[in-house]
Amino acid sequence: MELALVLLLGVTAVCGCGVPSYPPNTNRVVNGEEARRYSWPWQISLETFFPTCGGTLIAPNWVMTAAHCITFHTYRVVLAEHDMNKDEGPEQSLRVEKMIIHPKWNDNCPSCGNDIALLKLQTSAVLNDKVQLACLPQQGSSLSHNYPCYVTGWGRLYSGGPRAITLQQALLPVVEHSVCSQSDWWGSSAKTTIVCAGGDSKSACHGDSGGPLNCQGRDGKWYVEGVTSFVDGRGCNTPKRPTMFTRVASFIPWISEVRIDSVIHKSIKNKSCKV
């Protein structure tokens, strides 16, 4: 039986990533709450004429988001955003130069996986105490059952509810593959290239797409282990239907290849311009 799905529209670790100048408030276990300002400094807002998705700054000129967030519109990325209704000063608005969707992404089959895209920015972000890089996990690494991770974004506060004005965070414990792939859970839709997290009252929702699943490593750094992808068509908080995230650890070779190819292409182009 096919499951109804709803897309949530609306490299290795390097030194200097995953350590916010303003540590996030992770003391309370709640469904969702306003995040501490600039405590997720790699979170970006992806916008056309209005905010559409989230994303993660993984290099000064590269953003990672969901493939289903990308259309043919011209995008900009806003960093150091917190309150959508206010210009608070530290925001950086950067135009997107190139959009690269994973070649195996299929718009007609969200549960097939590969819901990941990379955006190259026209100019590099200025890194400071409010704009920083997320760490990427090691290739092939996995998370244990109930591992505490946080989803962040400006999506709807609940199914059919209003969109968040300020950046929200919610604790989403990981649901390991052996559980998430059971027939009364996500079944065959739970691919090994997908991370399941949350469930019941804990969930991402429409508008959170493309944003990070933030998980703190034993080294104290925060790693973006997932890219927010989809929820069950019956609602964001459907029992035994945790939020589905693209598993970043499965795509490290592709991410590295895209970025290396971009550097090589730029080098060749620059050389060809010399007289």
Image: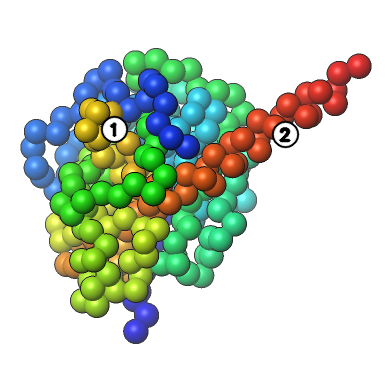
Q: Is residue 124 left or right of residue 133?
A: right
Q: Earlier in the sequence, mark 2 or mark 1?
A: 1
Q: Which mark is residue 265?
A: 2
Q: Is residue 36 left or right of residue 15?
A: left
| Residue neighbourhood size for the residue with mark 1, other residues' Cα within 10 Å, grouped as few (<14), some (14–19), many (≥20) | many
Q: Which mark is residue 33?
A: none
The structure residue drawn at horizontal position 30% and vertical position 50%, both measured from the top left corner, is 142
Give above or below for 190 relative to 102.
below
**In front of the other: 222 or 29:** 222
Q: Tag 1, which secondary structure?
A: strand
Q: Which residue reaches farthest left?
A: 28
Amino acid type at circle 1 is: Trp
**Percent from the top left, x then y, of residue 212?**
35, 42
- Image quarter hosting the C terminus: top right
Quadrant in which residue 111 is drawn: bottom left
Quadrant in which residue 38 is drawn: top left
**Percent from the top left, x then y, of residue 11?**
47, 37
Q: Which residue is mark 1?
A: 222
**Percent from the top left, x then y, of residue 157?**
23, 49
The structure residue drawn at horizontal position 36% and vertical position 61%, both measured from the top left corner, is 192
Q: Tag 2, which secondary structure?
A: helix
Give above or below for 109 relative to 100.
below
Q: Is residue 256 visible?
A: yes
- Image quarter hosting the N terminus: bottom left
The structure residue drawn at horizontal position 57% and vertical position 51%, both measured from the top left corner, is 101
